[in-house]
Image (tube, grey):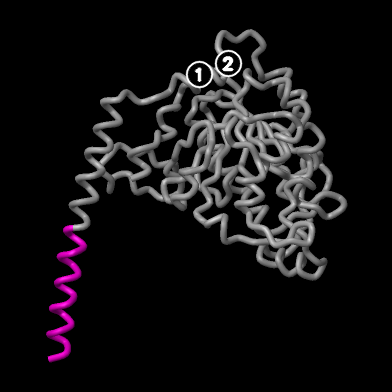
Amino acid sequence: ANMAIYEQTSILHNQFSGRAAIIVSPGPSLEKNIELLKDVKGRAVIICVLHALRDLQISGVDPDIVVHVDPRDLKTVNSKKNGKVTSLWNQWIDGNDLSKVNLVVSNYQRPNMFEVSAKNVIWMSSGLPIGELLPIDVFDYERVGGSVSHAAFDLAVELGCTSIALVGQDLAFSKDGANYTKHADLGEISKDKRAEKLKAYGDDVETEGWNNQKVISNNTFIAFGKAFESFARELNGKDIALFNCSEGGLYIEGFEHCKLSTFIENQVSTGIEKSVADLLIKCKSTPEQNQYRIKETIKFIMKNRILAQEIRDLIKNLFRIVEK
């Protein structure tokens, strides 16, 4: 039902041709250049993962688009902050001001994410190619890499952005062992618990870093980096320039590695007619399109409820036969 009521991100496709996009993640290096994002607001499309929103808003930056496509219920994921047990919903939803941003969620998200008081809630079909099974036109995003930042990158490509920069996408530990900024830290945890939790990410690995120096990463982070490399190979030959501006993080083949200031100077246009916010406001379905979606979805739901009832009756008869 939410897919019929809310807009799909495909309505934004190719609306930002010629614009630069900056994908913001909460890696430790974000703190080095977060202030620069103020200078590009309105000129470049700033897309951040929900986990990085607190850092941006504390620095006075409201991103254009916030992406969260993790299917987990944030109200059930708990950690300890300042001695109190709190959920990721408290930290990421209640603890931020989403009224100033456009929130992109997944069509297989928990329904409560559609009810967040954001400026706009829009959905994308990321990772599960189910569009052909549904009664309305659905664009299935196929650049699946395992993290929300990959979905954000996929969205930037389809928006028509001609240059894309990764910021805070360290995929490696800082020199003091951190893998997030201090504002993105998920909660108080002992050294032993932290080590145990990181075991799920695989073994620590020394590998090539952003500035030709070695960094400490792990199997999962390296796999995420390989996914970005796969995206770069797929986009090779297309008019999209890729940059990794996550200073001190993992080296990602297929991306040009430079400072964010260099990317802004060379890739972000200064003379623009319409701001990113203006372009986002324009992208809406007509009332007729909205009514068509709702009508077709109601028919689809009713049809499947009848089908489910028939299957239930068949199973009941089958049980009777088996019992005999």
Say whether residue 93 is magenta.
no
Judge whether 206 appears above or below 23 on screen: below
Inter-mark Cα distance, 2 to 1: 7 Å
Judge whether 180 appears above or below 264 on screen: below
What secondary structure is the magenta-colored segment mainly? helix
Amino acid type, label 2? Ser
Q: Secondary structure at mark 2?
A: loop
Which residue in the protein does label 2 denote?
Answer: 275
| Position of residue 105 measured from the top left corner of the image (x, y, whole percent) | 49, 43
Which residue in the protein does label 1 denote?
Answer: 279
The quadrant of the picture occupied by the N terminus is top left
How would you rate the neighbour count of disc 1 (Cα within 10 Å): few for under 14, some for 14-19, many for 20 or more?
few
User: Decide: marks 2, 1 in contact (CB < 8 A)?
Assistant: yes
Is 248 displayed left or right of 137 in the figure? Answer: right
From where the camera sits, is residue 43 visible?
A: yes
| Position of residue 157 measured from the top left corner of the image (x, y, whole percent) | 52, 31
| Position of residue 126 measured from the top left corner of the image (x, y, whole percent) | 45, 45
Figure disc tally: 2
Give, as a single range, the part of the protein colored magenta.
Answer: 306-324
Judge whether 190 appears above or below 269 on screen: below
Q: What's the residue at 53%, 51% (across, down)?
A: 70
Name the foreground residue: 15 vs 123: 123
Q: What's the residue at 28%, 28% (across, down)?
A: 289
